[in-house]
Image (cartoon, rainbow, N blue to C red):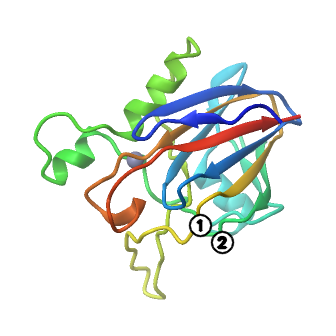
Amino acid sequence: MSDLVTIPARRGKAAFVAAGQTVRVVNTHGEQVVDTWAFNRHDLTEFMSMEHSRSGMRRLIPRIGDTLLTNHRRPILTMTEDTSGGIHDTLMAACDRYRYEGLGVVGHHDNCTDNLAQGLAELGLVPAETPSPLNLFMNIPWTGQGELSFEPPVSTPGSHVSLRAEMDLVIAFSACPQDILPINGRTCRPTEAHFAIMA
Ligand SMILES: [Zn+2]
């Protein structure tokens, strides 16, 4: 296993992952949502797609053994471990400046969309767009009537998810800086998280 890499609180981090390697994402402090993207290493216009993945999985939330698909419907990541309680989100767009403007923020607010660009920029890459992320540890329950709500995570400190790369890819994370809604815990205090790449 590689050393643990920090996804700093309110920031992004990205890494290259070879096909067959596994990425372990650790919810270090237990209540931090980690927006997760994966791009084909050789063609950034092919990326993990939540809408294509839901179609392939026939589920709203991936479980152990489920494979996430790209916008070309090819396998890109398989969930191989989950000690977090199994609550994640595939429905919500990444937060962005417009989201915070809508929540009444005046001026700059850190956001996952900028964090994706920042994380990839550290690798010399530019995303063509901001795909809808796999929101690890994010708790968006739904009712039988289809109503959604934003709730605190149920994951515990140190719990983790493991994702196996099904192609050479670039993985990117954002420790979501949402501090207005309680999606990062009722105290609304975003924290760091970590990941490691295993052979
Ligand atoms: Zn966010």
Screen quadrant of the N terminus: top right
121 in relation to 25, above or below? above
Q: Is residue 68 visible?
A: yes
Residue extending furthest bottom? 144
Residue 41, given in percent of the width and then of the height, sits at 71, 23
Screen quadrant of the C terminus: top right
Q: Quadrant of residue 7?
A: top right
Kind of residue at disc 1 = Thr
Q: Locate residue 52 relative to residue 96 in the image: left or right.
A: right
90 in relation to 147, above or below? above
SS for callout 1: loop
- Where does label 2 land, which residue? 85
Q: CA distance from mark 1 to mark 2?
A: 8 Å
Camera-side residue: 182 or 64?
182
* Residue occupying the point 55% across, 59% down: 90
- Where does label 1 land, which residue? 156
Camera-side residue: 92 or 27?
27
Q: Tags 1 and 2 in contact by the CB under 8 Å rule?
A: yes
Camera-side residue: 97 or 45?
97
Kind of residue at disc 2 = Gly
Residue 186, given in percent of the width and then of the height, sits at 35, 68
Q: Is residue 71 visible?
A: no
* Residue occupying the point 49% across, 44% down: 192
SS for callout 2: loop
Query: Sequence-wise, which precedes: disc 1 or disc 2?
Result: 2
* Residue occupying the point 58% across, 67% down: 155
Front tag of 1 and 2? 1
Q: Quadrant of residue 106?
A: top left
Residue 187, given in percent of the width and then of the height, sits at 32, 64
Camera-side residue: 72 or 159?
159
Residue 66, given in percent of the width and then of the height, sits at 79, 60
